[in-house]
Image: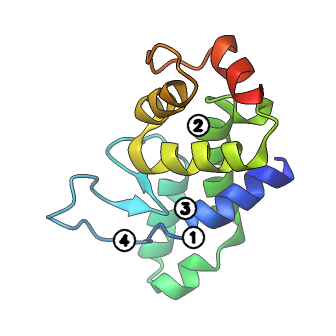
Amino acid sequence: MDANYLLGYKDTIGDEGCTLEVDKDDNGGRTWKGISQPMHPNWSGWFVLDNHIKAGHSLDIIKQDKTLETMVQSFYYKEFWLKLRINEIKIQSIQLKFFNTSVNVGLEPATKFQQASVNLPQTGIVDNALINALNA
């Protein structure tokens, strides 16, 4: 993971909550630092969280689990930063804004925002044209 990703992660994920129970008013179901269990049921962090719950650990104790934190960082790096090819963008401010937007609204809408910002067709797919335009 590169330094710009870690900066973006700290800034973006710092706003995401940690809950162990499902909020009936939240369509995302159970989430951990913004990772929704219904949307990402195979994330290995759910196993770690369930083990903490079975052991009766408090939320404060779970938040200190460095292995779980590494799993969250890896998830966002693979599923957002690399999928969107943000590592290929040369301008840090664009990297950070693209990452933050993608976490908050989703990959495709964030990509469409970036495409619109450089007058490209809004396909929602990151391609060489988008990367080149963002780097120009």
Amino acid at pointer 2: Glu
**Which mark is drawn over residue 113?**
none
Quadrant where the C terminus lies? top right
Residue 23 locus on image (x, y percent): 21, 67
The CA distance from mark 3 to mark 4 is: 12 Å
Q: Nearer the viewer, mark 1 or mark 4?
A: 1
Foreground disc of the pair 2, 4: 2
Earlier-in-chain disc, 2 versus 1: 1
**Image check: 37 left or right of 62?**
left
The amino acid type found where label 3 is placed reads Val
Q: Give me the disc on residue 79.
A: 2
Task: Identify which amino acid the numbered label 1 is placed on.
Answer: Gly
| Residue corresponding to mark 3 | 48
Q: Secondary structure at mark 2?
A: helix
Indicate the position of residue 59 as horizontal and vertical percent values: 47, 82
Q: Which residue is mark 1?
A: 14
Residue 70 on image: x %, y %:
70, 59
Instruction: Indicate whether 47 appears above or below 87.
Output: below
Where residue 20 is drawn, which disc sits there?
4
Q: Residue at x 63, y 14 (%)?
A: 127
Secondary structure, mark 4, is loop
Disc 2/disc 4 C-alpha distance (Å): 22 Å
Q: Which sits in the foreground, 11 or 69?
A: 11
**Badge 3 or badge 4: first in the primary sequence:** 4
Q: CA distance from mark 2 to mark 1?
A: 17 Å
Circles 2 and 1 in contact, beta carbons < 8 Å: no
Q: Residue at x 25, y 65 (%)?
A: 22
- Report x, y in % for residue 63: 57, 77
Q: Nearer the viewer, mark 1 or mark 3?
A: 1
Q: Is residue 44 above or below residue 109?
A: below
